[in-house]
């Protein structure tokens, strides 16, 4: 019989040192977003399922926990991604004419983890720009994502660029929905044998393009190869120019970042509508940050606004970001002395951490490393090094 105190699989408590680390990262990333002009919003954890799974949110159906509202009897969903909610806020609550920059940071819940060691309760940080359809917005979102990683002290190993229009154009030649899903899975796995099997009923140009996509990853030479290998010229010219422009701009502002291309990247291929990106860190196998353009996100809410953004899991970022260890603090005895209590309040008001040692617990400091103490000297309470 399992213990009642065991948590569900892929759900975990966050203990003091890690929780403080995550919170400091959250504040730092929100500060970076604010400096770009992004406004913070906080959507609710629960919504009516129709709202959560509308528009691009339909891709999240299997990932969303569902329950019945005791008040209305309607089906509610626990958000698995905040982007559809932020799109609803832009479309219905703010309803601005021009550019809107919004950011958010809050928990999401998913029915299944992203991987063997993944969590089902990420702490999602993200940023979105609404109202600008051109590449300047894509570039701003990319630079914000890279600056957030820099603020966290995490080195970006590779930035992979792709474009959903390329994959979508290839998949248009696959008419059966079930076959399209199988082809997408084989492309994502770069499984050439399965693509040959699935492509038996496809036209030669479509099969040739599918097989070409498998090898179209690497440095900028990939773009030149794509121009000669894919039979998608009406779409291809624009997408390749867009990717080349983004890469060139990023090399100017972030020369330390290795820019690559993976034209068959299919993570959330039904979600995105244009240029997209994934950021990998040194030593990491999975993308830490994913983002891109999703221009249809607001259509279901009555405002088909161009949109581009990114998100990351703050818990995953905390695992990679250097922490400060124990927090420096001032130790103080507990006493009724008015002067001591006033000194403690003054220090705390100035931003210091003061840990009062309760009677009988004078040697307990927990996560705080008390490198100073408050002592009485000549009738005054002064701070001195331990």
Image (cartoon, rainbow, N blue to C red):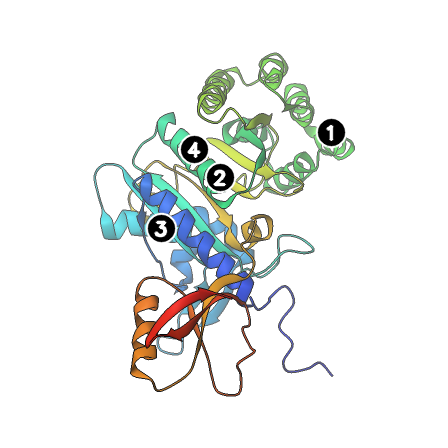
Residue 332's place in the image compared with 320, above or below, is: below
Residue at the image point whose x is 52% and y is 15% from the top: 233
| Residue found at the very far front of the displayed protein | 378
Q: Picture coordinates of residue 89 (x, y %)?
A: 30, 52
Residue at numbered disc 4: 143
**Quadrant holding the N terminus:** bottom right
- Compare residues 332 and 31 and report the one nearer the observer: 332
Please identify the quarter of the rendering in which residue 375 is found: bottom left
Q: Mark 2 points at which residue?
A: 150
Secondary structure beneath dot 2 equals helix
**Residue linked to disc 3:** 86
Q: Which residue is drawn at 44% across and 65% down?
A: 384
Instruction: Give the residue drawn at x 34%, y 67%.
Output: 347
Please state if 192 lies on the left or on the right of 8 as rendered. right
**Earlier sequence position, callout 2 versus callout 1:** 2
Task: Depth check: give the residue in front, 280 or 264.
Answer: 280
Say which label, 3 or 1, has the lower sequence index. Answer: 3
Rounded to the nearest whole Å, what is the CA distance between mark 2 and mark 1? Answer: 47 Å
Residue 182 location in percent, x, y? 67, 40
Nearest to N terminus: mark 3 or mark 4: 3
């Amino acid at each position: 019989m399992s213990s009642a105190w065991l948590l569900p699989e892929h759900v975990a408590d966050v203990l003091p040192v890690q929780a403080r680390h995550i919170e400091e990262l959250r504040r730092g990333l929100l500060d970076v977003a604010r400096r770009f002009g992004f406004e913070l919003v906080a959507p609710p954890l629960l919504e009516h399922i129709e709202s959560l799974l509308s528009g691009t949110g339909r891709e999240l159906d299997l990932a969303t926990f569902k329950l019945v509202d005791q008040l209305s009897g309607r089906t509610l969903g626990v958000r698995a991604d905040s982007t559809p909610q932020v799109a609803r806020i832009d479309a219905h609550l703010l309803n601005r004419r021009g550019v809107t920059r919004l950011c958010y940071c809050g928990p999401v819940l998913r029915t299944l983890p992203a991987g063997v060691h993944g969590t089902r309760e990420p702490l999602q940080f993200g940023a979105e720009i609404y109202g600008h359809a051109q590449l300047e917005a894509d570039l701003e979102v990319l630079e914000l994502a890279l600056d957030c990683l820099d603020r966290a002290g995490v080195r970006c190993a590779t930035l992979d660029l792709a474009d959903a229009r390329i994959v979508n154009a290839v998949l248009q030649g696959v008419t059966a929905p079930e076959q399209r899903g199988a082809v997408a899975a084989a492309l994502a796995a770069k499984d050439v044998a399965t693509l040959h099997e699935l492509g038996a009923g496809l036209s030669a140009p479509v099969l040739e393009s599918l097989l070409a996509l498998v090898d179209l990853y690497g440095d900028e030479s990939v773009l030149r190869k794509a121009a000669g290998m894919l039979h998608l010229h009406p779409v291809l010219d624009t997408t390749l120019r867009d990717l080349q422009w983004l890469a060139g701009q990023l090399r100017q502002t972030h020369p330390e970042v290795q820019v690559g291309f993976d034209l068959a990247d299919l993570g959330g291929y039904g979600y995105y509508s244009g240029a997209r990106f994934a950021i990998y860190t040194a030593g990491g196998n999975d993308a830490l940050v994913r983002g891109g353009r999703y221009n249809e996100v607001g259509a279901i809410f009555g405002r088909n606004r161009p949109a581009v953004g990114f998100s990351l899991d703050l818990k995953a970022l905390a695992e990679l970001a250097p922490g400060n260890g124990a927090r420096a603090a001032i130790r103080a005895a507990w006493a009724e002395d008015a002067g001591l209590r006033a000194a403690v309040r003054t220090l705390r008001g100035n931003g210091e951490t003061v840990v009062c040692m309760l009677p009988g617990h004078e040697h307990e400091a927990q996560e705080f490393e008390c490198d100073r103490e408050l002592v009485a000297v000549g009738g005054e309470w002064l701070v001195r090094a331990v």
